[in-house]
Amino acid sequence: MAGREMLLESDVIEAACRELERRGYIIGQRLQAHEHGCDIIAHKHQGVRSTLMIEAKGETSSRAGSGRHGHAFDSRQVTSHVARAVYTALVHLSGSSEDIGAGLALPATEFHLRTVAAVRPMLERLGVVLFWVGADGTVEIESTWQV
């Protein structure tokens, strides 16, 4: 991964928001990495899940002074933050109506892809949308429903 910029959480959020807007969503909330709450809340006026609540993670620390800034998270750190993101998605789904969908926006790195693969069948069963952000900012969406 040397020789390129790491995706910060804010980069992942921006890429996911661009893709959602391209698909006709209105972004109601777009947090910065240091803010607390649901990272992205997007609305669409049609469809079963007209509101989408998304938790985002980057591939390195967003805090310039931290020891991890500019260095990719290791597999244990990725497992930890993906687990927290999945928990957050489950909370969104648990306290919601059918109009709410949940998603994860993550860097498309080997560790993130491998970590999510272990729980992908359950995420699919629950209808959790996956936004995979490439190093170039492109987004691939995995979903069992039309986003």
Image (cartoon, rainbow, N blue to C red):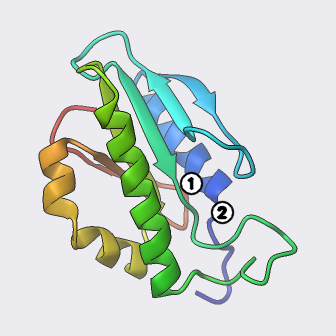
Q: Quadrant of the C terminus?
A: top left
> Residue placed at 20% from the left, 62% from the top?
120
Using the numbered discs, state the Cα–Cα distance from disc 1 to disc 2 in whole angstroms.
7 Å
Q: Residue 74: image x %, image y %?
A: 53, 86
User: Secondary structure beneath disc 1?
Assistant: helix
Work out whether residue 78 can be spotted: yes
**Nearest the eye: 116 or 140:** 116
**Nearest the eye: 97 or 136:** 97
What is the number of the mark on residue 8?
A: 2
Work out whether residue 133 can be spotted: no
What is the number of the mark on residue 62?
A: none
User: Secondary structure beneath disc 2?
Assistant: loop
Answer yes or no: do the residues labelled 1 and 2 have beta carbons within 8 Å?
Answer: yes
Mark 1 lies on residue: 12
Q: Residue 45: image x %, image y %?
A: 36, 9
10 Å crowding of disc 1: few (<14), some (14-19), many (20+)? many
Q: Is residue 74 above or below residue 129?
A: below
